Image (cartoon, rainbow, N blue to C red):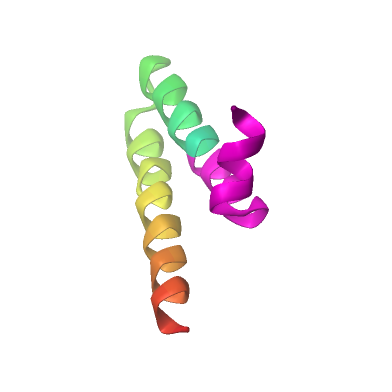
Amino acid sequence: MLKSFIKRIGVMNFIVLLVVLSIIIVSEVMFLQGQKLEAIFIAFWAPTILGFMNYLKFRK
């Protein structure tokens, strides 16, 4: 199941999705530890990375 998903979206897209997921998890942990401003700052990275990925995809 995972191999077919990776094959369908591509290895690089899968890696980017893993990075985005890890950013979201780190942001949640920081928020729960009381570092709210830092967590919000880091949380903005995920949509920025996804937006940049979409820009590059549609630019072709």
Classify 8 as above or below 54.
Answer: above
Residue 3: say if magenta. Answer: yes
Residue at point 37%, 15% (across, down): 32
SS assignment for the magenta stretch, majority: helix
6 to the left or right of 28: right
Seen from the viewer's position, the closer of residues 24 and 9 is: 9
Classify 56 as above or below 44.
Answer: below
Seen from the viewer's position, the closer of residues 58 and 50 is: 58
User: Range of the magenta residues?
Assistant: 1-20
Q: Residue furthest bottom?
A: 60
Give the x, y percent position of residue 15: 63, 47
Give the x, y percent position of residue 46: 42, 48
| Count of numbered marks | 0
Q: Residue furthest top?
A: 33
Could you say which quadrant of the image residue 29 lies in? top left
Classify 32 as above or below 22.
Answer: above
Seen from the viewer's position, the closer of residues 29 and 60 is: 60
Give the x, y percent position of residue 33: 42, 15
Classify 4 as above or below 60.
Answer: above
Q: Which quadrant, please, contains the N terminus?
A: top right
Give the x, y percent position of residue 56: 47, 75
Could you say which quadrant of the image residue 48 lies in? bottom left
Residue 4: say if magenta. Answer: yes
Residue at point 54%, 34% (across, down): 22
Residue at point 33%, 29% (across, down): 36
